[in-house]
Image (tube, rainbow, N blue to C red):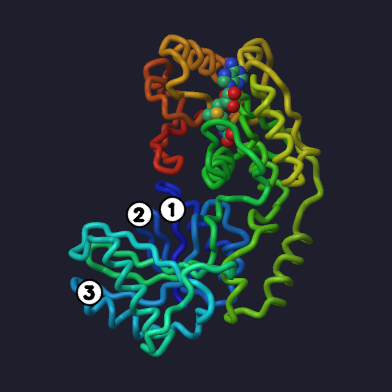
Amino acid sequence: MKFLLTCLAWLEAIAKNEIIKQWWTIVEVKDRLIFFEWPKELMAKINLWSRVGNKLYIVLHERKNTDNFDTLYDDVYNIDWKKYLNRYYPVIVKATSIKSTLSSTPAIQKITKKAIVDKMTNKSGKMMPEESDKPIFEVFTFFMDDSAYILLNTSGETLYKRWYKADTGEAPIKESLAAALVILSNWKYSENFYDIFCGSGTIAIEAVMFARNIAPGLYRYFSFENWNLLPQWYFDELRKEAKEKIFPKKYSVIASDIDEEVLEKARINAKNAKVDDSITFLKKDFKEYKYEKMTGTLLSNPPYGLRLKDDDLRGMYKDINMILDKNKELSGGIITAYTDFDHLINLNHYKKRKLYNGNELCYFYAKK
Ligand SMILES: C[S@@+](CC[C@H](N)C(=O)[O-])C[C@H]1O[C@@H](n2cnc3c(N)ncnc32)[C@H](O)[C@@H]1O
Protein backbone atom coordinates (compact mmCIF):
# COMPACT_ATOMS: atom_id res chain seq x y z
CA MET A 1 0.00 0.00 0.00
CA LYS A 2 1.34 3.44 -0.86
CA PHE A 3 1.22 6.25 1.71
CA LEU A 4 1.87 9.97 1.86
CA LEU A 5 2.93 11.75 5.04
CA THR A 6 2.69 15.54 4.86
CA CYS A 7 4.75 17.84 7.09
CA LEU A 8 5.69 21.48 7.57
CA ALA A 9 8.15 22.90 5.04
CA TRP A 10 11.81 22.17 5.85
CA LEU A 11 10.96 19.33 8.21
CA GLU A 12 10.99 16.69 5.45
CA ALA A 13 14.33 15.17 6.50
CA ILE A 14 13.20 14.71 10.10
CA ALA A 15 9.80 13.32 9.04
CA LYS A 16 11.56 10.93 6.67
CA ASN A 17 13.89 9.70 9.44
CA GLU A 18 10.91 9.01 11.66
CA ILE A 19 9.46 6.78 8.95
CA ILE A 20 12.77 5.01 8.38
CA LYS A 21 12.92 4.30 12.11
CA GLN A 22 9.58 2.44 11.93
CA TRP A 23 10.09 0.85 8.51
CA TRP A 24 12.43 1.49 5.63
CA THR A 25 10.94 1.90 2.16
CA ILE A 26 11.06 5.57 1.18
CA VAL A 27 9.71 6.13 -2.29
CA GLU A 28 10.05 9.84 -2.85
CA VAL A 29 10.51 13.08 -0.90
CA LYS A 30 9.11 16.34 -2.28
CA ASP A 31 8.34 19.73 -0.79
CA ARG A 32 6.36 18.90 2.40
CA LEU A 33 5.48 15.42 1.07
CA ILE A 34 6.97 12.00 1.82
CA PHE A 35 5.71 9.05 -0.21
CA PHE A 36 6.46 5.50 0.88
CA GLU A 37 5.27 1.90 0.54
CA TRP A 38 4.12 -0.03 3.59
CA PRO A 39 2.01 -3.00 4.54
CA LYS A 40 -1.31 -1.53 5.63
CA GLU A 41 -0.94 -2.55 9.30
CA LEU A 42 1.88 -0.10 9.74
CA MET A 43 -0.26 2.97 9.02
CA ALA A 44 -1.25 2.69 12.67
CA LYS A 45 2.39 2.92 13.71
CA ILE A 46 3.23 6.13 11.90
CA ASN A 47 0.06 7.84 13.13
CA LEU A 48 0.93 6.84 16.66
CA TRP A 49 4.65 7.71 16.53
CA SER A 50 5.22 10.59 14.09
CA ARG A 51 6.15 13.72 16.07
CA VAL A 52 6.64 16.00 13.06
CA GLY A 53 4.09 14.73 10.50
CA ASN A 54 0.88 16.60 9.64
CA LYS A 55 -1.41 13.96 8.14
CA LEU A 56 -0.93 10.42 6.88
CA TYR A 57 -2.84 9.56 3.69
CA ILE A 58 -3.35 6.36 1.73
CA VAL A 59 -2.57 7.04 -1.93
CA LEU A 60 -5.61 5.45 -3.59
CA HIS A 61 -4.71 6.56 -7.07
CA GLU A 62 -2.18 8.68 -8.91
CA ARG A 63 -1.86 9.69 -12.54
CA LYS A 64 0.45 12.05 -14.38
CA ASN A 65 -0.94 14.45 -17.01
CA THR A 66 -4.48 14.63 -15.62
CA ASP A 67 -5.67 17.72 -17.46
CA ASN A 68 -9.43 17.17 -17.84
CA PHE A 69 -12.38 16.48 -15.54
CA ASP A 70 -13.56 13.37 -17.43
CA THR A 71 -10.29 11.59 -16.61
CA LEU A 72 -10.53 12.76 -13.01
CA TYR A 73 -14.12 11.48 -12.72
CA ASP A 74 -13.24 8.09 -14.25
CA ASP A 75 -10.16 7.64 -12.08
CA VAL A 76 -12.06 8.47 -8.90
CA TYR A 77 -15.01 6.29 -9.93
CA ASN A 78 -12.73 3.31 -10.60
CA ILE A 79 -11.33 3.27 -7.06
CA ASP A 80 -12.77 0.46 -4.93
CA TRP A 81 -14.40 2.90 -2.48
CA LYS A 82 -16.52 0.22 -0.81
CA LYS A 83 -13.31 -1.21 0.60
CA TYR A 84 -12.68 1.98 2.59
CA LEU A 85 -15.88 3.99 3.03
CA ASN A 86 -19.18 3.34 4.71
CA ARG A 87 -22.32 4.11 2.70
CA TYR A 88 -23.98 5.63 5.78
CA TYR A 89 -21.13 7.88 6.91
CA PRO A 90 -20.43 11.33 5.43
CA VAL A 91 -17.51 11.94 3.10
CA ILE A 92 -15.88 15.33 2.77
CA VAL A 93 -13.61 16.15 -0.12
CA LYS A 94 -10.77 18.65 0.12
CA ALA A 95 -8.63 19.76 -2.81
CA THR A 96 -5.46 21.65 -3.58
CA SER A 97 -4.03 22.45 -6.97
CA ILE A 98 -0.46 23.61 -7.59
CA LYS A 99 0.81 24.55 -11.06
CA SER A 100 -1.82 22.39 -12.82
CA THR A 101 -4.26 22.73 -15.73
CA LEU A 102 -7.20 21.82 -13.47
CA SER A 103 -6.85 24.71 -11.07
CA SER A 104 -10.36 25.31 -9.71
CA THR A 105 -10.43 23.55 -6.33
CA PRO A 106 -14.25 23.83 -5.92
CA ALA A 107 -14.68 22.10 -9.32
CA ILE A 108 -12.13 19.40 -8.40
CA GLN A 109 -13.96 18.83 -5.10
CA LYS A 110 -17.34 18.63 -6.87
CA ILE A 111 -16.23 16.10 -9.49
CA THR A 112 -14.42 13.95 -6.93
CA LYS A 113 -17.44 13.89 -4.64
CA LYS A 114 -19.81 13.09 -7.51
CA ALA A 115 -17.69 10.14 -8.64
CA ILE A 116 -17.49 8.79 -5.06
CA VAL A 117 -21.25 9.10 -4.46
CA ASP A 118 -22.02 7.52 -7.87
CA LYS A 119 -19.79 4.57 -7.03
CA MET A 120 -21.03 4.11 -3.45
CA THR A 121 -24.72 4.30 -4.46
CA ASN A 122 -24.42 2.44 -7.78
CA LYS A 123 -25.55 5.64 -9.51
CA SER A 124 -28.98 5.17 -7.89
CA GLY A 125 -29.36 8.89 -7.28
CA LYS A 126 -29.59 8.29 -3.53
CA MET A 127 -27.35 10.64 -1.61
CA MET A 128 -24.85 9.69 1.01
CA PRO A 129 -25.25 11.68 4.25
CA GLU A 130 -23.77 15.18 4.19
CA GLU A 131 -23.86 15.63 7.93
CA SER A 132 -24.34 13.26 10.79
CA ASP A 133 -22.87 12.43 14.15
CA LYS A 134 -21.05 9.51 12.51
CA PRO A 135 -17.29 9.61 11.84
CA ILE A 136 -16.28 11.56 8.75
CA PHE A 137 -14.14 10.22 5.92
CA GLU A 138 -11.84 12.82 4.39
CA VAL A 139 -10.74 12.45 0.79
CA PHE A 140 -8.07 14.81 -0.50
CA THR A 141 -7.63 15.38 -4.24
CA PHE A 142 -4.23 16.87 -4.76
CA PHE A 143 -2.89 18.23 -8.05
CA MET A 144 0.74 19.11 -8.55
CA ASP A 145 2.27 19.80 -11.98
CA ASP A 146 -0.75 18.03 -13.57
CA SER A 147 -0.20 14.88 -11.51
CA ALA A 148 -3.39 13.93 -9.69
CA TYR A 149 -3.32 12.14 -6.33
CA ILE A 150 -6.50 10.77 -4.79
CA LEU A 151 -5.79 10.46 -1.08
CA LEU A 152 -7.65 9.16 1.95
CA ASN A 153 -6.84 10.77 5.30
CA THR A 154 -6.00 8.08 7.86
CA SER A 155 -5.18 10.53 10.67
CA GLY A 156 -8.33 12.62 10.97
CA GLU A 157 -7.25 15.80 12.77
CA THR A 158 -3.68 16.86 12.03
CA LEU A 159 -1.12 14.90 13.98
CA TYR A 160 0.32 18.01 15.61
CA LYS A 161 -2.93 18.46 17.53
CA ARG A 162 -1.83 16.54 20.61
CA TRP A 163 -4.29 15.34 23.21
CA TYR A 164 -2.71 17.33 26.04
CA LYS A 165 -3.40 20.85 24.75
CA ALA A 166 -6.27 22.15 26.84
CA ASP A 167 -5.46 25.78 26.18
CA THR A 168 -2.77 27.99 24.63
CA GLY A 169 -1.44 31.51 25.05
CA GLU A 170 -0.83 33.90 22.19
CA ALA A 171 1.23 32.72 19.20
CA PRO A 172 1.72 29.11 20.30
CA ILE A 173 4.26 27.09 18.39
CA LYS A 174 2.97 24.04 16.52
CA GLU A 175 3.65 20.85 18.47
CA SER A 176 5.27 19.25 15.41
CA LEU A 177 7.67 22.17 15.05
CA ALA A 178 8.46 22.15 18.77
CA ALA A 179 9.23 18.41 18.55
CA ALA A 180 11.47 18.97 15.51
CA LEU A 181 13.41 21.67 17.38
CA VAL A 182 13.91 19.34 20.33
CA ILE A 183 15.34 16.76 17.92
CA LEU A 184 17.57 19.41 16.29
CA SER A 185 18.77 20.76 19.64
CA ASN A 186 20.64 17.54 20.52
CA TRP A 187 19.62 17.92 24.15
CA LYS A 188 21.48 15.47 26.38
CA TYR A 189 18.76 14.22 28.69
CA SER A 190 20.99 14.14 31.76
CA GLU A 191 21.44 17.93 31.46
CA ASN A 192 19.11 20.87 32.09
CA PHE A 193 16.65 22.00 29.43
CA TYR A 194 15.35 25.59 29.50
CA ASP A 195 12.52 27.40 27.76
CA ILE A 196 12.69 30.98 29.06
CA PHE A 197 9.61 32.15 27.08
CA CYS A 198 7.54 29.00 27.60
CA GLY A 199 4.00 30.35 26.97
CA SER A 200 1.62 27.36 27.12
CA GLY A 201 4.58 25.01 27.55
CA THR A 202 4.68 23.32 24.14
CA ILE A 203 8.47 23.12 23.77
CA ALA A 204 9.08 21.92 27.33
CA ILE A 205 6.29 19.32 27.10
CA GLU A 206 7.47 18.01 23.72
CA ALA A 207 11.03 17.79 25.11
CA VAL A 208 9.99 15.55 28.00
CA MET A 209 7.67 13.49 25.77
CA PHE A 210 10.60 12.88 23.44
CA ALA A 211 13.02 12.05 26.27
CA ARG A 212 10.52 9.72 27.90
CA ASN A 213 9.58 8.10 24.58
CA ILE A 214 5.89 8.96 24.98
CA ALA A 215 4.15 8.31 21.64
CA PRO A 216 2.71 11.66 20.47
CA GLY A 217 -0.56 10.00 19.39
CA LEU A 218 -0.98 7.78 22.44
CA TYR A 219 -4.26 9.14 23.77
CA ARG A 220 -5.92 10.44 20.63
CA TYR A 221 -8.24 8.99 18.04
CA PHE A 222 -7.42 8.44 14.34
CA SER A 223 -9.78 8.19 11.38
CA PHE A 224 -8.56 4.76 10.32
CA GLU A 225 -9.90 3.32 13.57
CA ASN A 226 -13.36 3.51 11.98
CA TRP A 227 -12.46 1.43 8.98
CA ASN A 228 -12.59 -2.28 8.46
CA LEU A 229 -9.08 -2.23 7.04
CA LEU A 230 -7.38 -3.00 10.36
CA PRO A 231 -8.72 -5.06 13.24
CA GLN A 232 -9.18 -2.99 16.42
CA TRP A 233 -7.11 -5.50 18.44
CA TYR A 234 -4.08 -4.62 16.33
CA PHE A 235 -4.17 -0.97 17.28
CA ASP A 236 -5.06 -1.75 20.92
CA GLU A 237 -1.96 -3.94 21.04
CA LEU A 238 0.16 -1.16 19.50
CA ARG A 239 -1.07 1.35 22.10
CA LYS A 240 -0.37 -1.12 24.91
CA GLU A 241 3.14 -1.68 23.54
CA ALA A 242 3.70 2.11 23.31
CA LYS A 243 2.71 2.50 26.98
CA GLU A 244 5.22 -0.17 27.94
CA LYS A 245 7.95 1.69 26.04
CA ILE A 246 7.66 4.86 28.16
CA PHE A 247 10.75 5.52 30.31
CA PRO A 248 9.63 6.41 33.84
CA LYS A 249 12.66 8.71 34.31
CA LYS A 250 12.50 12.30 35.60
CA TYR A 251 14.22 15.13 33.72
CA SER A 252 15.31 18.63 34.65
CA VAL A 253 13.26 21.00 32.50
CA ILE A 254 12.86 24.64 33.53
CA ALA A 255 10.07 26.53 31.78
CA SER A 256 9.50 30.17 32.63
CA ASP A 257 7.37 33.06 31.42
CA ILE A 258 6.48 36.52 32.67
CA ASP A 259 2.75 35.89 32.39
CA GLU A 260 1.18 33.94 35.27
CA GLU A 261 -2.04 33.33 33.31
CA VAL A 262 -0.29 31.53 30.46
CA LEU A 263 1.82 29.58 32.98
CA GLU A 264 -1.36 28.20 34.51
CA LYS A 265 -2.33 26.86 31.07
CA ALA A 266 1.14 25.37 30.67
CA ARG A 267 0.85 23.57 34.01
CA ILE A 268 -2.50 22.06 32.97
CA ASN A 269 -1.09 20.98 29.60
CA ALA A 270 1.94 19.37 31.26
CA LYS A 271 -0.31 17.52 33.69
CA ASN A 272 -2.47 16.27 30.80
CA ALA A 273 0.66 15.05 29.03
CA LYS A 274 1.78 13.32 32.26
CA VAL A 275 5.13 15.11 32.21
CA ASP A 276 4.52 17.64 34.99
CA ASP A 277 6.89 15.81 37.36
CA SER A 278 9.81 16.75 35.07
CA ILE A 279 9.03 20.43 34.42
CA THR A 280 9.51 23.28 36.88
CA PHE A 281 7.30 26.19 35.79
CA LEU A 282 8.43 29.60 37.04
CA LYS A 283 7.03 33.10 36.75
CA LYS A 284 10.17 34.92 35.74
CA ASP A 285 11.31 37.76 33.50
CA PHE A 286 13.86 36.27 31.08
CA LYS A 287 16.24 39.16 31.96
CA GLU A 288 16.93 37.50 35.31
CA TYR A 289 18.83 34.78 33.43
CA LYS A 290 21.43 37.42 32.47
CA TYR A 291 22.84 37.05 35.97
CA GLU A 292 22.72 33.25 36.18
CA LYS A 293 25.06 30.55 34.95
CA MET A 294 23.21 28.17 32.65
CA THR A 295 24.32 24.80 31.32
CA GLY A 296 22.54 22.24 29.17
CA THR A 297 20.15 23.25 26.39
CA LEU A 298 18.01 26.35 25.86
CA LEU A 299 15.18 26.27 23.33
CA SER A 300 12.83 29.23 23.19
CA ASN A 301 10.31 31.02 21.03
CA PRO A 302 10.49 34.68 22.16
CA PRO A 303 7.83 37.22 21.22
CA TYR A 304 8.29 39.06 17.95
CA GLY A 305 4.80 40.33 17.17
CA LEU A 306 3.34 43.74 16.71
CA ARG A 307 2.49 44.14 20.38
CA LEU A 308 6.06 45.16 21.21
CA LYS A 309 7.64 48.43 20.10
CA ASP A 310 10.68 48.18 17.87
CA ASP A 311 13.07 49.49 20.53
CA ASP A 312 11.69 47.04 23.10
CA LEU A 313 12.18 44.20 20.63
CA ARG A 314 15.76 45.24 19.88
CA GLY A 315 16.52 45.43 23.59
CA MET A 316 14.94 42.06 24.23
CA TYR A 317 16.85 40.32 21.42
CA LYS A 318 20.13 41.95 22.50
CA ASP A 319 19.59 40.48 25.98
CA ILE A 320 18.73 37.07 24.53
CA ASN A 321 21.94 37.15 22.54
CA MET A 322 23.85 38.11 25.68
CA ILE A 323 22.42 35.11 27.57
CA LEU A 324 23.31 32.72 24.75
CA ASP A 325 26.74 34.26 24.26
CA LYS A 326 27.70 34.41 27.92
CA ASN A 327 26.83 30.76 28.60
CA LYS A 328 29.30 29.16 26.22
CA GLU A 329 28.37 25.62 27.23
CA LEU A 330 24.68 26.14 26.54
CA SER A 331 23.43 24.39 23.39
CA GLY A 332 20.13 24.90 21.54
CA GLY A 333 18.92 28.25 20.23
CA ILE A 334 15.86 30.34 19.51
CA ILE A 335 13.13 30.28 16.90
CA THR A 336 11.75 33.61 15.78
CA ALA A 337 10.29 35.56 12.88
CA TYR A 338 12.21 38.66 14.04
CA THR A 339 14.72 38.94 11.20
CA ASP A 340 16.46 42.01 12.66
CA PHE A 341 18.06 39.53 15.06
CA ASP A 342 20.62 39.04 12.28
CA HIS A 343 21.91 42.58 12.84
CA LEU A 344 22.21 42.21 16.60
CA ILE A 345 24.29 39.07 16.72
CA ASN A 346 27.49 37.59 15.43
CA LEU A 347 26.06 35.21 12.83
CA ASN A 348 29.29 33.20 12.97
CA HIS A 349 28.13 31.91 16.36
CA TYR A 350 24.82 30.59 15.00
CA LYS A 351 23.57 28.21 12.36
CA LYS A 352 20.50 29.86 10.80
CA ARG A 353 17.80 27.53 9.51
CA LYS A 354 14.62 28.49 7.67
CA LEU A 355 11.39 26.98 9.07
CA TYR A 356 7.65 27.57 9.04
CA ASN A 357 5.32 27.72 12.02
CA GLY A 358 2.19 26.89 10.00
CA ASN A 359 2.31 29.48 7.22
CA GLU A 360 4.55 31.86 9.10
CA LEU A 361 8.16 32.05 7.99
CA CYS A 362 10.60 31.97 10.87
CA TYR A 363 14.22 31.08 11.56
CA PHE A 364 15.88 28.79 14.02
CA TYR A 365 19.14 30.30 15.25
CA ALA A 366 20.98 27.30 16.64
CA LYS A 367 24.12 27.90 18.70
CA LYS A 368 27.20 26.50 17.04
C1 LIG B 1 5.69 33.48 21.17
S1 LIG B 1 5.14 33.26 22.82
C2 LIG B 1 5.74 31.64 23.22
C3 LIG B 1 4.72 30.61 22.85
C4 LIG B 1 5.07 29.22 23.32
N1 LIG B 1 6.19 28.65 22.60
C5 LIG B 1 3.85 28.32 23.20
O1 LIG B 1 3.88 27.35 22.44
O2 LIG B 1 2.82 28.62 23.84
C6 LIG B 1 6.22 34.30 23.73
C7 LIG B 1 6.03 34.27 25.24
O3 LIG B 1 6.99 35.17 25.83
C8 LIG B 1 6.43 35.67 27.03
N2 LIG B 1 7.18 36.90 27.43
C9 LIG B 1 7.08 38.16 26.94
N3 LIG B 1 7.96 38.98 27.56
C10 LIG B 1 8.65 38.21 28.46
C11 LIG B 1 9.69 38.48 29.39
N4 LIG B 1 10.19 39.70 29.54
N5 LIG B 1 10.17 37.44 30.12
C12 LIG B 1 9.64 36.20 30.01
N6 LIG B 1 8.64 35.89 29.14
C13 LIG B 1 8.15 36.88 28.38
C14 LIG B 1 4.97 35.91 26.68
O4 LIG B 1 4.18 35.93 27.86
C15 LIG B 1 4.68 34.72 25.76
O5 LIG B 1 4.07 33.67 26.47
Residue at horizontal 26 percent and vertical 66 percent from the top: 107
Q: Quadrant of ligand 1?
A: top right
**Kind of residue indicated by mark 3:** Phe
Residue 3 appears anywhere in the view: no
In the shown orientation, is residue 108 left or right of residue 360?
Answer: left
Q: Is mark 3 within 8 Å of ligand 1?
A: no
From the image, tell me which residue sits under label 1: 12
| Proximity of marks 1 and 2: CB atoms separated by less than 8 Å | yes
Q: Tell me the quarter of the picture where residue 166 sits.
A: top right
Query: Which secondary structure lies at badge 2?
Result: loop
- Residue 78's label in the rendered image is none
In the rendering, at what x and y percent does residue 237 appear?
A: 73, 72
Disc 2 within 8 angstroms of ligand 1 (CB): no
Query: Mark 3 falls on what kind of element?
Result: helix
Dot label at residue 31: 2
Q: Nearer the viewer, residue 132 or 336?
A: 132
Give x and y (percent) for residue 144.
27, 62
Q: Is residue 139 above or below residue 115?
A: above
Secondary structure found at label 1 = helix
Residue receiving disc 3: 69
Residue 201 % position (x, y): 65, 35
Seen in the picture, residue 207 relative to 159 is either above or below; the reply is above
Question: Looking at numbered disc 2 in the image, what kind of residue is underneath it?
Answer: Asp
- At label 3, counting other C-alpha atoms closer than 10 Å, the crowd grade (few under 14, some 14-19, many 20 or more) is some
Instruction: Determine if residue 44 is in view.
Output: yes
Tell me the crowding category of disc 2: few under 14, some 14 to 19, or many 20 or more residues within 10 angstroms, Cα based: few
Marks 2 and 3, the one that precedes in the sequence: 2
Residue drawn 64% across and 54% down? Answer: 216
Is the Cβ of the residue at disc 3 closer than 8 Å to that at disc 1?
Answer: no
Dot placed on the residue nearer the N-terminal end, 3 or 1:
1
Q: What distance separates the C-alpha of mark 1 from that of mark 2?
A: 7 Å
